Amino acid sequence: MNIADYKGIWVFAEQRNGELQKVALELLGEGRKLADKLGVKLTALLLGENVGNIADVLGKHGADEVLVADNPLLKNYTTDGYTKVICDLVHERKPGILFIGASFIGRDLGPRVSARLQTGLTADCTALDVEAESGTLLATRPAFGGNLMATIACEAHRPQMATVRPGVFAKVETENADYKVENVEVKLEASDIRTEVVEVFKEVKDIVDISEAKVIVSGGRGVGSAENFAKLQELADELGGAVAGSRAAIEAGWIDKSLQVGQTGKTVRPNIYIACGISGAIQHVAGMQDSDVIIAINKDESAPIMSVADYAIVGDLNKVLPEFIAQVKELKE
Ligand code: FAD
């Protein structure tokens, strides 16, 4: 392998039923910055059936080029089909870097592609950078149970691969009208795919997506019980926000697992994050530190959450929350 032959940044533009996943646009936003730093092209890779109409969205979110692999065999995601098409394209065009969203699909696809290409993959990154001179990707992620952040480089193999969870980066809309859309040839037979998708159904859950919420009222062990979460819900309702929690609150069974914020939960970046009775362990902070304004309510003034908070309220939740709700109501009147 001649590393110098590998240039450019690719982003896998995951779509489901013709709907782009927001992580693809977030990766394009970050990819744009890195491509500018390296002076290379940013390419979005779109696989599916009849998906050409969404290529423009990718161009308007930073891509210089959109490669569209359109084929009935790519209608539904299959590990075999998507891996083959992506690996064929990588062999042919030699990108230096390939980013994939750490969705359920991306977590399946990323390792398979990297193994087939015999290259490295850094999963669940929280920060990405590049060395302008060498083109080396610097992928940062929590390591050793979140006790330290490791920056990982894959110097000897290409492409350099990383997955990033939804919500870690912000999407950026550009005025770019110069992007190029190219339909690529898909060399895929039904016999290349060893699985058959018989039916796709969505699990219907009456649960909010906290990664989209503008205001989050989050509770930890200090909340004390499932019943006490009603007070957090009341505050969230007043502020037009959503309730979430730390892993301790989820493990206690007080709220649903899909509402967990942190390293093994969701990454959120709301306008306001109110941490109630949460100590601020590094694994929790990793998922909320990019919130615009952080308000912490904790009876322990030395709790680590206080040092990431913009506003720290030292006190017992049971006293502070009713007062907080009353004041919000008063302001709204
Ligand atoms: P605690 O640490 O017990 O803190 C409770 C806080 O409530 C304390 O600061 C206390 O002062 C305060 N308090 C108590 N009573 C009151 C009151 N009446 N009024 C006001 N304040 C009060 N954690 C996550 O959150 N998300 C993750 O994704 C995650 N992933 C992890 C992954 C790994 C590999 C590991 C090892 C751990 C992970 N954890 C995660 C767990 C994490 O290390 C902490 O254990 C957890 O975040 C603690 O939750 P907590 O802050 O609610 O509870």
Image: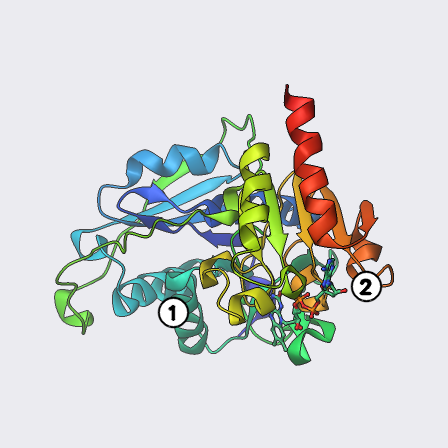
Q: Position of residue 26 (x, y in %)?
A: 54, 46
Q: Position of residue 220 (x, y in %)?
A: 63, 61
> Residue beneath label 2, please?
303
> Residue beneath label 1, please?
108
Q: Nearer the viewer, mark 1 or mark 2?
A: 2
User: Helix, strand, or loop for circle 1?
Assistant: helix
- Seen from the viewer's position, the closer of residues 163 and 183 is 163
How crowded pointer 1 is (Cα within 10 Å; few <14, some 14-19, many 20+) is rated as some
- What residue is drawn where x is 39% and y is 73%? 112
- Seen from the viewer's position, the closer of residues 90 and 222 is 222
Work out which residue is located at the far top of the displayed protein and give it.
333
- What residue is drawn where x is 34% and y is 64%? 88
Residue 289 is at least partly visible in this image:
no
Q: Position of residue 317 (x, y in %)?
A: 71, 53
Q: Place residue 328 in its image quadrant.
A: top right
Q: Amino acid at mark 1?
A: Asp
Q: Position of residue 42 (x, y in %)?
A: 54, 46
How crowded pointer 2 is (Cα within 10 Å; few <14, some 14-19, many 20+) is rated as some
Q: Is residue 229 left or right of residue 282?
A: left
- Seen from the viewer's position, the closer of residues 145 and 109 is 145
User: Sequence-wise, which precedes: disc 1 or disc 2?
Assistant: 1
Q: Amino acid at mark 2?
A: Ala
Q: For disc 2, does the CB lie below 8 Å from ligand 1? A: yes
Residue 83 is at least partly visible in this image:
yes
